[in-house]
Amino acid sequence: MSQEIYPKKDDIIEVVKKSRSKHAAKPGETGLVYSVKMNDWGTVKCFFMTEQQEKKWATIKSCKVIGKIDQKWRRILKEAQEKEALPVIMKVIRKSKNAALVEIVQKPKLGELWIPFKCASENLRSIENSQIQFVSIPKWLAQSKKIV
């Protein structure tokens, strides 16, 4: 009895057979998995990014794991994240182990907000308290915190 290896986050996959959906990825496409989720009907879908930074999906039964994340894919992922980021001017109030309490200079009425380090550009961790600097954050985070 063979044991199937299902894709998970940071796996490199290849779509090996066609899904029934007309919007699913085509056989032969490869990419880096960034999420695996189940829909309301119980179908587990694998969301991945191609080398051209296109976001696609396929059912996990139509995918085959062909490797793990490597330097090439880390570079592609970083470029995609930078492309989708929004630069914001922030003043750091204080920092914890995982986040920084900041004030958005462009919108002082928002008050103080916690921004997780894993969501912001790497320079947020190195900014000293009371220092003002540009920090890139994802658009979804900016929208959820009502910055844009």
Image (cartoon, grey):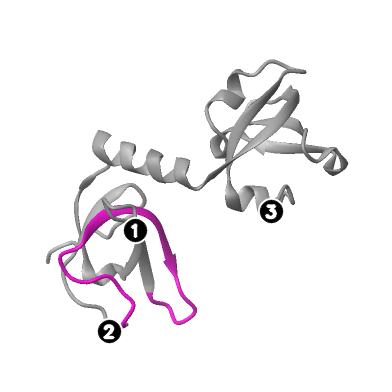
What residue did someone put label 3 on?
A: 144
What residue did someone put label 1 on?
A: 54
| SS at mark 1 in the image | loop
Please determine whether, in this image, residue 4 is positioned above or below residue 75: below
Residue extent of the magenta highlight: 22-43
Q: Position of residue 101 (x, y in %)?
A: 74, 31
Residue 24 among magenta residues: yes
| SS at mark 2 in the image | loop
Badge 3 crowding class, 10 Å Cα cut-off, few under 14, some 14 to 19, many 20 or more, is few
Give the amino acid type for the residue marked by disc 1 in the picture.
Glu
Task: Compare marks 3 and 1 and give the one earlier in the sequence.
Answer: 1
Q: Residue at x 56, y 40 (%)?
A: 119
Please determine whether, in this image, residue 14 is positioned above or below residue 39: above
As measured in the structure, the alpha-carbon distance from the residue carrying label 1 to the one carrying label 2 is 20 Å
Badge 2 crowding class, 10 Å Cα cut-off, few under 14, some 14 to 19, many 20 or more, is few
Q: Is residue 24 left or right of residue 100?
A: left
Residue 29 among magenta residues: yes
